[in-house]
Amino acid sequence: MHESSSPGTLGSAAISLRGVSRIFDGGVEAVRAMDLDVAAGEFVALIGPSGCGKSTLLRIIAGLDRATCGTVAIAPAAPLAFVFQDAHLLPWRNVLRNVTLPLELAGMEKTRRIERAMTAIEQVGLADAIKRYPAQLSGGMRMRVSLARALVTDPGLLLLDEPFAALDEITRQQLDEQLRELWARRKMTVLFVTHSINEATFLADRAIVFTRRPARIVIDHRLDLPPKRMSVLRAEPTFARQTGILLEALQRGNT
């Protein structure tokens, strides 16, 4: 069951899952009896083996899939936005018109939606590319457009499903830094699915490691790192200690 709830029902949580399971046709169990609370404004990374149910759980929270049993409560807030692994840009629309699309569908007046889109595009560093079409953009630029399109609605909850997985390491680290900075400014609630322990450690304040399918929680770990994250942090001993904790949990969950 997927529902919105009053703040009183959720307490300080933006998301509350109770007993959530998902069994697909044929008896494939993706998620088992999941209990999870995410506080408003948290940045939470979800990590686990390939095919363990992370993306299924994210889709259930987004309302794109339904739990077989259990409840999903989402606090009423600003809009929810979802960023997929593929940018899913419309090839016949340039950057500006791709980013304005959600506002256009919502019926927002043209001048206002262009102003909002330009702000989001500037925030992801693409102000000089507004007239380019997707085929003229690199993979990293296309993901920036996808992120801007999500941000343009001013979401209270941002869900990201391995958005940077297909990018080269340098581009991926640049986007990790940019996303962390955007979150620090906006303080939206973020759930970020990734296979990368390094990425999860750098981005999140809290990392949840799942077992192999069906997904169950191995560890729910608050990362002991400074709020301000720069690329040099990845070389620090404190960063290595945190990644080690997550790696050990991932290995336990994969046995």
Image: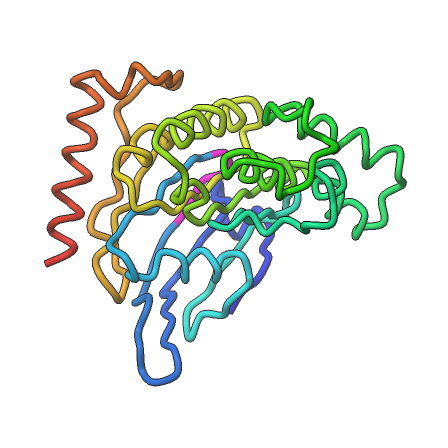
Q: Position of residue 129 (x, y in %)?
A: 68, 28
Image-quadrant location for residue 38: top left
In the picture as drawn, the residue positioned furthest to the bottom comes out as: 26
Q: How many marks?
A: 0
Q: Looking at the image, which residue is at 38% across and 65% down?
A: 20
State whether residue 245 is above or below residue 108: above
State whether residue 81 is above or below residue 147: below
| Left or right: 9 as drawn, with respect to 79 | left
Q: Position of residue 83 (x, y in %)?
A: 53, 47
| Left or right: 171 as drawn, with respect to 7 | left
Q: Looking at the image, which residue is at 70% across and 35% down?
A: 132
Instruction: State which region is magenta.
Output: 37-41
Q: Looking at the image, which residue is at 39% across and 61% down?
A: 18
Q: How is the image coloured?
A: rainbow
Q: Position of residue 217 (x, y in %)?
A: 25, 54
Q: Between residues 177 and 12, which one lies in front from this camera angle?
A: 177
In the picture as drawn, the residue positioned furthest to the front comes out as: 136
Residue 171 lies in the magenta stretch: no
Q: Looking at the image, which residue is at 10% across and 58% down?
A: 255
Q: Between residues 174 and 197, which one lies in front from this camera angle?
A: 174
Please identify the dominant SS of the magenta region: strand
Image-quadrant location for residue 167: top left
Q: Position of residue 17 (x, y in %)?
A: 42, 57
Q: Between residues 197 and 72, which one lies in front from this camera angle?
A: 197
Residue 38 lies in the magenta stretch: yes
